[in-house]
Image (cartoon, grey):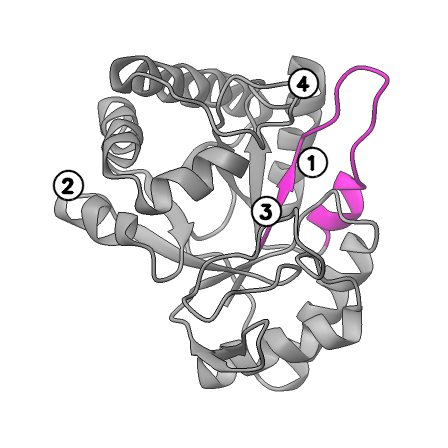
Amino acid sequence: MDINSDLGEGYGAWAMGDDAAMLGIVSSANIACGFHAGDPLTILSTLREAAARGVAVGAHVSYPDRVGFGRRKMDVAPAELTADVIYQIGALQGLAAAAGTRVRYVKPHGALYNTIADDAVQADAVIAGIRAVDPGLTLMALAGAPILDRARAAGLTVVAEAFADRAYTPTGALVSRRDPGAVLHDPDLVAARMLRLATEGVIEAADGSTLRLEAQSICVHGDSPAAVEMAARIRERLLAEGVQVASFAGAGR
């Protein structure tokens, strides 16, 4: 099982999360590309640390929305969205090369991630952007979402992802951050949920029902207050129960 986190999201004097600590725990790192967060030096420093630790690197592409941290849905024309994706991947590829590593996959961020899960028009625009840069890049997307099949049909390799620190609806969607209980904070509870997902392929939905999810990667949001403790507890529980923790993309260098 892969464990990933969203990193490189600081900006200048403003720090977001403990990237160095998280890179000692996760097997894959989704690195901001500047559209929702991240400045060139922060991104480059995070990439260098990922390379030193052998953590696989992915492009965390977003709507152009720094003020909203990429969490506001935007009505972007398909051609513009494709160009935005190409631009962000290209920027991260250049910084990754300077850091001694390379971009292996793409994971959309925030509102873009949630929108393309079901929106065929924006999904196809993102897929087109990835294919234009490198059709060998893997797309990471929400487990059970239609975009996984659309990307496979377009020739991309896909990885289905589950969220450790988010509640799920009975249909497999993420509970909106605007709703109570959408974000989970108890490291022990989260670790137990992820162990069950890894070993049984199921997770408990917000209404108490059992939801079956086929996922190859677990995300812990780097900006959660207990992110490091949560990620560490998940890794410890998985390893203790014989579940190997490794990136789907291989070693990070």
Instruction: Check if residue 22 falls in the magenta segment.
Output: yes
The residue that disc 4 covers is 67
* Residue identifier under label 1: 49
Q: Residue at x 45, y 77 (%)?
A: 211
Query: Does residue 97 show up magenta in the picture?
Result: no
3D distance between C-alphas at marks 4 and 2: 33 Å
Work out how far the residue at label 3 is from the one at label 1, CA to CA, in angstroms. 9 Å
Q: Is 150 on the left or on the right of 58, as rendered?
A: left
The residue type indicated by label 1 comes to Glu
Mark 3 or mark 4, whichever is nearer to me: 4
> Nearer the viewer's eye, disc 3 or disc 2?
2
Q: Which comes before the other along the chain, label 4 or label 2?
A: 4
Q: Earlier in the sequence, mark 1 or mark 4?
A: 1
The amino acid pointed to by label 2 is: Ala
**Residue holding disc 3:** 54
Label 3 amino acid? Gly
Dot 2 corresponds to which residue? 154
